[in-house]
Image (spheres, rainbow, N blue to C red):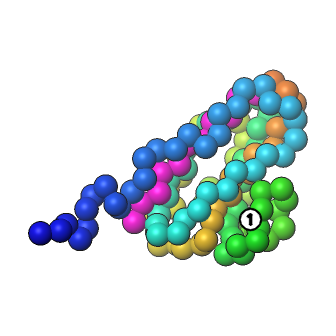
Amino acid sequence: MHDLNATHENYTSVEHIVDEVDAASGDFRYAFNMEGYNYASVHRKCSGGCTMKIFASNDSTAVTGADTGWVDVSSDVLGATGMVDSEDIYFIDTSQKPLQWMVKYSLSDATNAVDVWIRRYS
């Protein structure tokens, strides 16, 4: 008999999507696809003048080179318009199904550390 709801098919392994130390100042973006998943957890850890926001999009042409095609959902997900220099984990725990999410982090100088881990699940 085939298990129609196998545990390993309900979530992804943890992905370390951002791992930066002393990156140049500026804006950086990383998108991740949510097709097939309802929920996600986003664990962020940053220091040295790092501000982070979360965006969502159903626009398949939206790319990480700009905010065009993306909607800033930081207040909904983070509880604030952006988080600065801290470590937190956020649970996108209401069934939301955008095509993709994007983490955007802005660095004020080149003395910093940024890590972001995600896990998607059904």
Q: In x, y percent, where is residue 4?
A: 23, 71
Mark 1 closeness class: few <14, some 14–19, many ≥20 residues within 10 Å = some
Residue at the image point whose x is 46% and y is 44% from the top: 14
Residue at the image point whose x is 70% and y is 31% from the top: 20
In this view, the residue farthest toward the left is: 1
Q: Is residue 110 visible?
A: yes
Q: In x, y percent, where is residue 44?
A: 60, 42
Residue at the image point whose x is 42% and y is 60% from the top: 121
Q: In x, y percent, where is residue 10?
A: 35, 61
Residue type, label 1: Asp
Asked which quadrant contains residue 11, the reply is bottom left
Asked which quadrant contains residue 26, the reply is top right
Above or below: residue 31 compared with residue 116: below
Q: Can residue 80 be seen in this view?
A: no
Left or right side of 11 for 27:
right
From the image, give the main secondary structure of the stretch colored magenta.
strand
Left or right side of 33 for 111:
right
Which sits in the foreground, 21 or 35? 35
- Find disc 1 in the rendering and name its residue: 72
Q: Is residue 96 magenta?
A: no
The magenta span reads: 112-122
- The quarter of the rendered structure image containing the N terminus is bottom left
Q: In x, y percent, where is residue 23?
A: 80, 30
Left or right side of 86 for 12:
left
- The quarter of the rendered structure image containing the C terminus is bottom left
Asked which quadrant contains residue 49, the reply is top right
